[in-house]
Amino acid sequence: MPAEKITLSGKQETFLITLYAKAMESRMPDSLLKDEFAANTIRRIDYDFAKLNVLHDPMIGLALRAKIFDDWTREFIDHTPVATVLHLGCGLDSRVFRLEPPTSVRWFDVDFPKVIELRRRLYPERDGCHLIGASVTDPDWLRDVPADQPAMVIAEGLLPYLRKHEVLRLLDTLTESFPSGELAFDGYSRLGVSLLRLAPPVRATGASLHWGIDDPRELERQVPKLKLVKELTGLDPTQIARMSWPTRLTICLYQSVPAFRRLGRFLLYRF
């Protein structure tokens, strides 16, 4: 079978950063994520992953981020088994296969049309999983999603690429559309977004980053139905121990300074 040639660029290309990181972390003997779909998929893609310059420590960090969102999604499904999951900016993430949700869950993977076309060619169909090819900032895509069940909304590695008005409009629309639910995303402070722009993998794609959030409570005022449930600013010590000593030292120093501690964190809201 010929390899799939990638012709995407900019923010449509950034999903390859996380795909490659998860694939390579899953090949490590002490892997946290164990994502066999990612590991197998990169073998079927014609792309120079070396240009992304994704190093060992970020691989572990991105796998840890995925695991946190996996766990939050699994917890939501466990206590709300009849539900809808919206995986926004899904890229080639295999979360639906990692979690294997019950048939009572409607799952929607949403991303740009070209990304969804690629996903259809690389991943098998799964009962209960629906693919939507659209920009998340286009309000029309929600017309294809029944709004009669509680919803888990996952926006992993997505919101910083949107502008403030796009983020607020998206979250306001989602919270107004469903009777209840939860929202999980990685929130970077404004300083964190500025530093993220300098990351070699982001620079390699030419993608632009915009939205940052300094105070998670700020979003409660901007989108009144959202209520903050969890804010994780620290990383699992077991996973930090897998990283190089310079990274471990940097993380330790960052954790001692409040402004640095909130450069990047994982946020869970309820609505």
Image: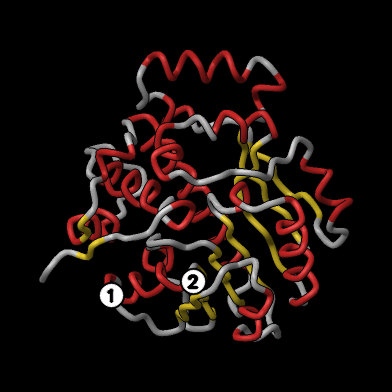
Answer with left or right where residue 185 lies relative to residue 8.
right
Residue furthest out toward the left = 1
Distance in Å between CA atoms under marks 1 and 2: 14 Å
Q: Secondary structure at mark 2?
A: strand
Q: Provide residue 99's location: percent of width, then percent of height.
A: 43, 64
Answer with left or right where residue 57 lies relative to residue 41.
right
Crowd class of label 2 (few under 14; some 14 to 19; many from 20; radius 10 Å): many
Question: Where is mark 2, residue-wise?
Answer: 109
- Which-is-in-front pick, marks 1 and 2? 1
State which quadrant residue 37 falls in: bottom left
Q: Which residue does the image show at 33% across and 70% down from the upper left?
A: 118
Q: Which residue does the image show at 50% across and 46% down from the upper left?
A: 207
Q: Which is more N-terminal, label 2 or label 1? A: 2
Question: Where is mark 1, residue-wise?
Answer: 121
- Amino acid under disc 2: Asp
The answer to whether 136 is drawn above or below residue 241 in the figure is below
Point out the image quarter for the C terminus.
bottom right
Say the numbered circle drawn on residue 24.
Answer: none
The answer to whether 232 is drawn above or below residue 181 in the figure is above
Q: Provide residue 97's location: percent of width, then percent of height.
A: 37, 67
Point out the image quarter for the N terminus.
bottom left
Q: Provide residue 2's location: percent of width, then percent of height.
A: 12, 68
Q: Which residue does the image show at 60% across and 76% down from the upper left?
A: 84
Residue 73 or 169: which is nearer the viewer? Answer: 169
Tag 1–tag 2 contact (CB < 8 Å): no
Q: Secondary structure at mark 1?
A: helix
Display colour scheme: secondary structure
Answer with left or right where residue 97 lies relative to residue 180.
left
The answer to whether 179 is drawn above or below residue 210 in the figure is below
Answer with left or right where residue 119 lies relative to residue 183.
left
